[in-house]
Image (cartoon, rainbow, N blue to C red):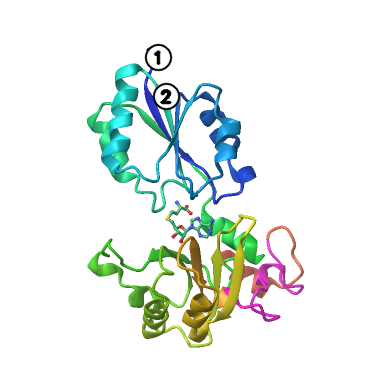
Amino acid sequence: MSGAAKVWFVGAGPGAPDLLTLRAAKVIGEADIVIWARSLIDEQTVREHARPGAEVVPSDERTLEEVVALYARAKAQGLVVARLQSGDPTIYGALHEQLEACRRLALPFEIVPGVSSVSAAGAALGQELTIPEVSQSLIFTRRPTRTSMPDNEELQAFAAHGTTMALFLSVRRPRELQQDLLDGGYAPDTPCAVVYKASWPDEVVIRCALQDLAAEVRGAKITTQALVLVGPALGDGPDAGRSHVYDPGYGHRYRRLGRPDRYRKASRG
Ligand code: SAH
């Protein structure tokens, strides 16, 4: 067989089989080779979507070079590859080097966006991460591990903004994490959440104050597959989650309530 070779980098979502997009399911169903990591999506789900006869390859024990060798074979044999990536492929997906490899092979590729674990974590918490007049920015970052951080991206500097922060790949050293966030200027009682395996059957949600974060993560023995969220929007007090847009005294474009002073404020913002 020698069709048009191509690699699809497919966002597989946070883990729940029904958080794959329709496009992802279609692409997986048409691929000749499906590459996926066992830690990220149930094998049964992959096999349900893959067409009979497709080559299904677990990626977890393969190096980048071995995966690229598969891409080279796809190119030579005119095969279509679906490479599943956790959440959204463009966020900490080790995607860049794979795209470079495709370019070197002159192998066409396309990316299918996915439901990020941040979205699944917000859903698990039942909260908005950007609450008007509480937090209007969401910082996606991580602590350095084997991957170092660019000099201008220190966690403390981000923490100084005091807005909502989503920390990927950062639960392994919770004491250092907590200290960096405190050093940056979050108050010790800043609300935090840890969401382990968002959208999986064994999902765990922990809420605590920043000063208790390390002890809570240790206590729950969480070392991987968790997001840490921190910032005032995560409070579960009566006012923390309240958006002024839906405040009974608040008018906006669709719902003016004779409060022009507040309306003007809204339109500026
Ligand atoms: N591309 C992915 C992130 C990959 S990096 C995305 O968009 O979500 C891997 C990190 O993502 C993990 O260390 C963890 O911090 C987070 N992560 C991925 N899936 C998760 C899940 N189901 N629940 C909680 N965190 C998750």
Left or right of residue 249, residue 160 in this image: left
- Pick the front one: 132 or 5: 5
Q: Secondary structure at mark 2?
A: strand
Whether pointer 2 and pointer 1 mark residues with C-beta atoms closer than 8 Å, the reply is yes
At horizontal 55% and vertical 24% (from top left) the residue drawn is 51
Q: Is residue 164 visible?
A: yes
Q: In the picture shown, does residue 26 fall above or below 201?
A: above
Image coordinates of residue 6 in percent, x first then y, are 38, 25
Left or right of residue 157, residue 16 in this image: right
Image coordinates of residue 182 in percent, x first then y, are 41, 84
Going by the numbered disc 1, the residue's amino acid type is: Gly
Q: In the picture shown, does residue 226 fall above or below 190?
A: above
According to the image, label 2 marks what residue?
80
Q: Is residue 160 visible?
A: no
- Pick the front one: 142 or 238: 142
Image coordinates of residue 162 in percent, x first then y, are 46, 78
Image coordinates of residue 247 in percent, x first then y, are 72, 72
Q: How many C-alpha atoms fall within 10 Å of the one at disc 1: few (<14), some, or many (≥20)?
A: few
Q: How many C-alpha atoms fall within 10 Å of the one at disc 2: few (<14), some, or many (≥20)?
A: many
Question: Between marks 2 and 1, how big is the CA–CA gap?
Answer: 8 Å
Q: What label sits on residue 3 in the rendered view?
A: 1
At horizontal 55% and vertical 29% (from top left) the residue drawn is 50
- Name the quadrant of the N terminus: top left
**What are the residue bounds of the magenta stretch?**
234-252
Indicate which disc, 2 or 1, sits on the residue closer to the N terminus. Answer: 1
Q: Is mark 2 within 8 Å of ligand 1?
A: no
- Pick the front one: 170 or 108: 170
